[in-house]
Image (cartoon, coloured by chain):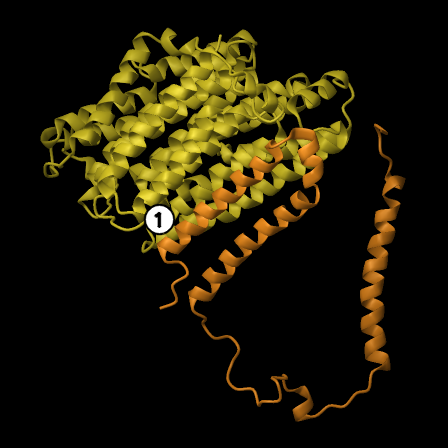
Amino acid sequence: MNAIIALSLLGIFTLFTGIFNWRKAMLPIVVIGLAGVFVLNGMDYFTTPSWYADYTHMVIFDRYAVVFSAALIMITAMLFFLCKQYYQKEDNNISDIYGLILFTLVGGMLMASFSNFAMLFLGIEILSIPLYILAGTKRLEVTSNEASIKYFLMGSFSTGFLLFGMALVYGAAHTFTLDGIRQYTDAHAGDLPTIFVAGIMLMLVGMLFKVSGAPFHFWAPDVYSGAPTLITTFMATVVKTAAFAALYRLLFYTFGSAKPIWFDALWGVAALTMIIGNFSALYQHGVKRMLAYSSISNAGYLLIGVIAMNTHSANSIFYYTLVYSLASLVSFGVLMLVTQDNGGDDSYTAFKGLARNNPALAGLMTLAMLSLAGIPPLAGFFGKYYIFINAMENGYIYIVLIAVANSLVGIYYYFKVIVAMFAKDTAPTKIAVQPAYLFALVVAAALLFVLGIFPDWVSGLMN
Amino acid sequence: MKEQSLVSDYIPILIQLCVAIGFVVATMLATHLIGPKRKGANKLESFECGIESEGNARLPFSVKYFLTAILFVLFDVEVIFMYPWAVNYKTFLHEMGMQGFFSMVIFLSLFLVGFYYIVRKGALKWE
């Protein structure tokens, strides 16, 4: 909880760096601040300060919350390394963008640590409202405006479903705390009242919207492709991780014994999400939109981890989201570089000849694509492996078969990027990359390798 | 507390709904039936303090009005939180000592920081 307080203050401080014109100091302050927040958060992993006990009915910083928060902070910090080059032409409002990103992170951490429906709702709103603005930060571009308004309208509508569901659950269980609702669910596991079942389902609609699970995924491609690419990266990594942390926490801590009620629905959503995500990605002409659909299909794989729900599920979901975030960071990072000088053309042809003039970038992109496709030495493979094995332990054979078939489809469109990069014709000119930018991408790609070889380093953190 | 609620428990809400709709319908009907009816060009014109109305009401307004209005709403809501706090202040002092005071200090200082921010940002500058 120290981390959340420190992070909020850091966000406010960042807003003021813009007013006082400390432009130069802004990024170092944010990055050093995030490092401090990471340490504060890490301390909660080992010891829990006694005053936390006063707030356990609202937020609990157990290992689950701390580990997910650590991943969120780390990915955000890496994202800030990309900011300097991405926003080099932007001179106004840059501090506001940074501040909003930090506030979004606060919301994400609350979504990983809530122990009360009120905090779940607050977390989702603290995460979403800055995002609505961030999606529209390219004020003069129509697509950015469209992304913002679309996300805002659909997001607030889905929040309505979530709230309505919470109200119905409260109506049955007479409490908002996760503990209280779990006791109620355990006690009435056999014959839960209809009002409670309806509440669970409506809450699931709201949560599935946030993780972009089909059929609630329609906002994702337009918002992802319309928003500034840096914000898209943020949405595909930090926001997705936070949304899955919240979904799993909600289902595992409260509705665990009501599994027969939501299992079939989530099974169907997982299958549908994978199929729609993968097959739509096949037909995309732009790489940014392809990555948006790939983000949807990855949500489908993650939902398998959610429905498996046994002792390894939390770990495997964490490992998968971390690895997926790293690979997304690299792929969107290279995409930003490719599109920065060519007028925003993100088609596959824009990548042609990248390997000849920018071998480093092409190598990084190849690693990211291979990891997303799930090729063995890389971490993406083990992410999928853990999720699938986990589901097999419970005997969910069919969903795993669907997932494996979908992974094979995925390989096709990820390799399309690689093939384009190593094609001989039309070569783009040399792309200027700042050292900090390259550093972040290299670290992320190296982590993909290291985590693939030593998955135990992070996959057992919650035990 | 009762675990199960029956449909019949919601009858008061239904009655309330009927009363609300009934009141609106009844008053509207009554005014139409009882009120005098004089129709003329002057009578149907929209009233603007006795001055003859001019032009269309759908003019584009400066966005500055909107900004001021939204900031007003924001700081107005702050006061709504302060009323119940002030009324219950003595109970707070009894139950949790100075914590009840400092919670409000934190809340207000965040608001002051926000106020300072919008002033420095020039959100209230008119020209």
Image location of residue B50, percent across then percent down: 62, 89
Work out whether A65 lies above or below B1: above
> Horizontal placement of A18 versus A169: left or right?
left
Say which quarter of the image contains residue A28: top left
- Left or right of A88? Residue A207 is right
Question: For this rendering, which residue is in front, A47 or A180?
Answer: A47
Q: Quadrant of residue A51?
A: top right
Q: On the rendered structure, is B80 left or right of A25?
A: right
Count of marks overlaid on the render:
1
Which chain has been coloured orange in this picture? Answer: B
Amino acid type, residue under disc 1 in the picture: Thr
Asked if residue A281 can be seen in this view, the reply is yes
Vertical position of residue A320 compared to residue A30: above or below = above
Q: Chain of mark 1?
A: A
The residue sitting at 16% across, 30% down in the picture is A435
- Quick one: label 1, few (<14), some, or many (20+) residues within 10 Å? many
Residue at horizontal 47 percent and vertical 28 percent from the top: A109
Q: Residue at x 32, y 50 (%)?
A: A138
Which chain can be seen in yellow?
A: A
| Depth order, front residue of B59/A424 | B59
Which residue was labeled with disc 1? A137
x%, y% of residue A385?
41, 12
Q: Looking at this view, is A226 or A1 the one in front?
A: A1
Residue A270 in picture, x, y percent from top left: 52, 26
Residue A14, percent from left and from top: 34, 40
Q: Say which of A411 and B74 sits in front.
A: B74
Residue, x 31% and y 20% (percent of image)? Answer: A371
Query: Element type at marker 1?
Result: loop
Q: Is residue A198 visible?
A: no
Direction from residue A71 to residue A169 in the image, left or right = right
